[in-house]
Image (cartoon, helix red, strand yellow):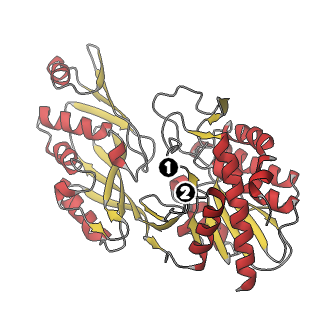
Amino acid sequence: MANFKRLAKGYEKIGIVALQKFIQIPSVYDSQTIAPLAPYGQNVKKALDYFAKLGEDYGFKVYNDEGHAVELSVGESGPLIGIYGHSDVVPVSGSWTYKEFGGELKDGVIYGRGACDDKGPLLAALYAVKLLKDNGLIKGYRVKIVSGGDEERGSSCLEHYFAKGHGEEPTFGFTPDANWPLIYAEKGITHAHARKIIDLDPVIAMDGGTVSNAVCDSLLVTMKPDKAFETYLKKNNVSADVTLSPELMMVRFKGKTAHGSTPELGDNAATKAFKALGEFYKLETLTLLAKAMDDPNGASFGGKEVSKELGPTTYNYGVIKYDGKSLSVSIDFRYGETADNKALLTKFFEFTKTLPVIDSETKPLLYSKKSPLVATLMKAYKKETFDLFAKPLAIGGGTYAKEAKNTVAFGAEWPKRPGNMHSPDEYIYVEDFVKDIAIYARAIFMLGKKAIKQ
């Protein structure tokens, strides 16, 4: 069999340059620039067009699904190996050391939003397919690598790709958008809003967070001037910056962002604000919203449930809006294979005395560890890494594996180099990028051979 490590090294230089340029496109969803062939805004379109141009330059067949996704394909006949990544990224927030969209290379590390989620792994998969193509190793099977443009907001891109009829379900597939070695199970995800028509005097407005699936790291509260509240914040060591004028007081509550699937790794500015305001001004709704998140697993309101494969439920506040009349709090709720998601969410809304608005739902995903897909990918990973004791994982995150059949998440975050996904100074090591190429090349080759024999 080919020496994939040696072959992958040959794609390091062009891969670095391509990834830097890819990161430099700020491909965040932008409703203000939506157009007929740019359903997620102009910058997401630029990223998808860039991915398509790479495929064209490398001799792939290119299909653009009306700006929702771009498909690159190689191979004439046989079973299909599908690879599904994404070109969109979450908005930037927090304090960065490096330019958010700089793609800066320093000491063997590339920094910038999308470096590990998901532009780096997506390009590693692309160069893995190119490696196989260049070395005549795609025979008797086909490969399609698809980049979506709306994964971070719920994967409408891949839904469109498959619904339009061009998207072909793979014999085997993977998405390079999680952790090594492999994800055999994913929690179900419900995105919802807690809403209430309410007067929160002396609060005039609240605005915080960037997306539902990230911990709110900053919440700006505009309110009537109150020196006593400022003193309260200082006395209780609440992390907040206060700007006081004769007419208004601006209080920016500060936290730390993290992925919505791991709220315990962050510090939610919204919860902090709700607790302080609720306690000081006796605002019941804010107090209840704060108490509900005393435990990110939901124990404080009876919403915690632990499943055998996927573990405990998690809850997170992402985006908060208040205009003086209406309060809206986005909730990212994740649950295991045995949890009753509707009953658990009902407990939350009853506890907080708010009205529920359900935005989207995806059910849990669970594959057998002994399935041909999981077994083959694990074998490929172990052969390239010599990590013979590696075991497939269950995660709280959601991936394209829920959108495509016969597909699991496979890489590419390394345990000791997690990449700061959805956080400041997101990164990927060049060394890991090259290893990813080698693993993906071997995996695609082995899946192709396995599919031919089925």
Residue at the location (64% across, 70% down)?
173
Q: Which mark is residue 324?
A: none
Badge 2 density bin: few <14, some 14–19, many ≥20, Cα 10 Å: many
Query: How far from the left and from the top, in percent, is residue 404?
Result: 60, 71
In the rendered image, the quadrant that contains the N terminus is: bottom right
Is residue 106 left or right of 10 when viewed as pictured?
left
Above or below, 170 against 236 in this view is below
Q: Which residue is mark 1?
A: 415
Q: What's the distance in space between the residues labelled 1 and 2, CA to CA?
A: 7 Å
Q: Which residue is mark 2?
A: 180
Above or below, 397 against 215 in this view is below
- Tags 1 and 2 touching, CB below 8 Å: yes
- Mark 2 belongs to which amino acid? Trp
Q: Nearer the viewer, residue 327 or 84?
A: 84
- Mark 1 belongs to which amino acid? Pro
Residue at the top extreme, as displayed: 246
Residue at the left extreme, as displayed: 282
Residue at the location (69% across, 73% down)?
447
Q: Nearer the viewer, residue 387 or 39?
A: 387
Query: How far from the left and from the top, in percent, is residue 292?
Result: 21, 51
In the rendered image, the quadrant that contains the C terminus is: bottom right
Is residue 251 left or right of 34 when viewed as pictured?
left
Badge 1 density bin: few <14, some 14–19, many ≥20, Cα 10 Å: few
